[in-house]
Image: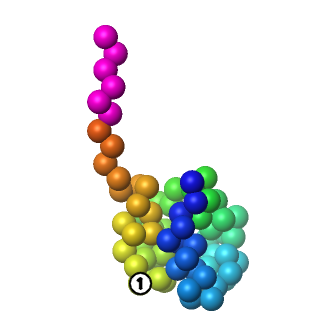
Amino acid sequence: MLRKNLITQRMNHNLTQREVAELLGISEVFVRKIERGDSNPGRRTMLKFEGLYGVSERELFPDLFEVNFDTFCII
């Protein structure tokens, strides 16, 4: 699952994944994995993205904040 808003924010700021990585002090590979949804950032990394883009972490990473009530019961 792509994190479209995260990618959109990077593009709106005219930044490459490499530039984001350098600004946040993380690896370019990690930025790529976060954007693709293959990896989840820790709390500190989420706050770094929030500070960089000026957008709340809930908007950048909605998949990490959605509430999912599993109503499936095994009988």
Residue 13 in view: yes
Quarter of the image with the N terminus in it = bottom right
Question: Chief secondary structure of the magenta span?
Answer: loop
| Segment colored magenta | 70-75
Q: Helix or strand or loop: what does disc 1 sit on?
A: loop
Establish if 29 lies above or below 72. Answer: below
Establish if 66 lies above or below 11. Answer: above
Image point (37%, 74%), residue name = 56
Establish if 21 lies above or below 74. Answer: below
- Left or right side of 59 for 40: right
- Left or right side of 75 for 23: right
Q: Amino acid at mark 1?
A: Gly
**Magenta span includes 51:** no
Image point (36%, 66%), residue name = 58
Q: Position of residue 43 (x, y in %)?
A: 42, 63
Q: Position of residue 14 (x, y in %)?
A: 62, 88
Q: Residues within 10 Å of mark 1 (few under 14, many from 20)?
A: few
Q: How is the image coloured?
A: rainbow
Residue 21 picture quarter: bottom right
Residue 44 in view: no
Q: Which residue is mark 1?
A: 54
Q: Position of residue 62 (x, y in %)?
A: 41, 61
* Most distant residue in the bottom direction: 14
Quarter of the image with the C terminus in it = top left
Image point (67%, 69%), residue name = 27
